[in-house]
Image (tube, helix red, strand yellow):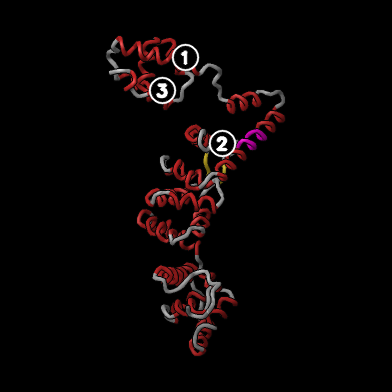
Amino acid sequence: MSASSLTGIERVAILLLCLGEEPTAQIFSALSDEEIHLVTQAMGNIEHIPQRQKEEVLQRFHKDHEENTGLFVKGREFVQNALAATPGKERSSQLLDQFIANMETRSLETIAKMNPQMVAGILEQEHPQTVALVLSTQTIIHSSEILASLSEEMRTDVVYRIAKLEKVSPEVINRIEDALHREIGLVSSKEQKQVGGIDAVVSLLHSMKNNLDADILESIEETDPVMAEEIRKRMFTFEDMMGLDSRALQAILREINNDSLTLALKTSSEPMREKIFANMSERAADMIKDDLEAMGPVRLSEVEAMQQTIVKIAIKLEEEGKIILGGGGSDELV
């Protein structure tokens, strides 16, 4: 087998075996654990190196060395170590914070300026957890455009992982930076950073177009019904019904009996009640008002459960194309 048909890892393995144990140990000191693992696995599989293969690998190494003369450094790591060693603990810490903040700003701006489809093309090859973290650092609009360009399978997985994100350690950020530095350039911050979470997913889904939010929620529900329920709960609440037009509100009320509606209105605001009563018959409204006055203490959990049941009805009607949640439209049929 000629050297040209070898993988990069295989060529490195042969080169190190030719160099000997001491040089190899020195080289290992500059590699990451993952890189060492890959190289040593390849080295362990080698029992014989043909003379011609050995010569080709060494010639390739000398050629690459001559073509890439100069100094290879890890600039960011060098600066951080230098600033950390600067006399004066307070001054050193301040300078380090400023450097990291400036580096992070430039990196995040780079992602924000990239075409969403281009970013998606890069991230499509990454682990969904990495993609989730990257999207969590971006604006909701930009993240939603990137998300829409990902494959359907990855899209759902990423949204689920964003919802599970809370804080990310500097070590995790460092590993991601190492993996994406050339294309995206994520960098770590000194303190843990708040990213992701249910609220981020709610904002993200609100920005999705072409009904992708419903598709993603449906897929998440298959994996984690509890999370899907929590996302739906925050995306549209019982009080949000105040913003619906009369046609949508009346369609929802037709699906609810008076007893259920009375329980749901137990803790609602006065404007909310007036909105509901204005969209039902006067007789039905009077009956519910009387029932509310006569109703004794009720567990808050029971009221919230009933409100959520009504919210589910509203969401189902929207999925069926019978209403549009969010209101703002005319009461006239089109």
User: Is residue 176 found inside the magenta-colored segment of the image?
Assistant: no
**Three-letter code for the amino acid on which mark 1 is drawn:** Gln
Nearer-N-terminus badge (1/3) = 1
Residue 264 placement, left or right of 222: right
Please state the horizontal and vertical placement of residue 125, each as a whole percent of the image.
Answer: 41, 40
Q: CA distance from mark 1 to mark 3?
A: 12 Å
Q: Are marks 3 and 2 in contact (CB under 8 Å)?
A: no
| Magenta stretch bounds | 97-103
Quickly name the residue at label 2: 188
- SS under mark 3: helix
Q: Residue at x 65, y 31 (%)?
A: 96
Q: CA distance from mark 3 to mark 2?
A: 23 Å
Magenta span: chief secondary structure: helix
Q: CA distance from mark 1 to mark 2?
A: 27 Å
Residue 105 placement, left or right of 132: right
Please state the horizontal and vertical placement of residue 241, each as a whole percent of the image.
Answer: 52, 72
- SS under mark 2: loop
* Snapshot quadrant of residue 256: bottom left
* Snapshot quadrant of residue 50: top left
Give the answer, above or below, for where 129 lies relative to 38. below
Quickly name the residue at label 3: 36
Nearer-N-terminus badge (1/2) = 1
Quickly name the residue at label 1: 26
- SS under mark 1: helix
Q: Are marks 1 and 3 in contact (CB under 8 Å)?
A: no
Give the answer, above or below, for where 272 lies relative to 182. below
The image's mark for residue 140 is none
- Taking depth in this image into account, of 92 and 2 the one nearest to the observer is 2
- Taking depth in this image into account, of 309 and 253 the one nearest to the observer is 253
Please state the horizontal and vertical placement of residue 76, each as a whole percent of the image.
Answer: 59, 28
Q: Are marks 1 and 2 in contact (CB under 8 Å)?
A: no
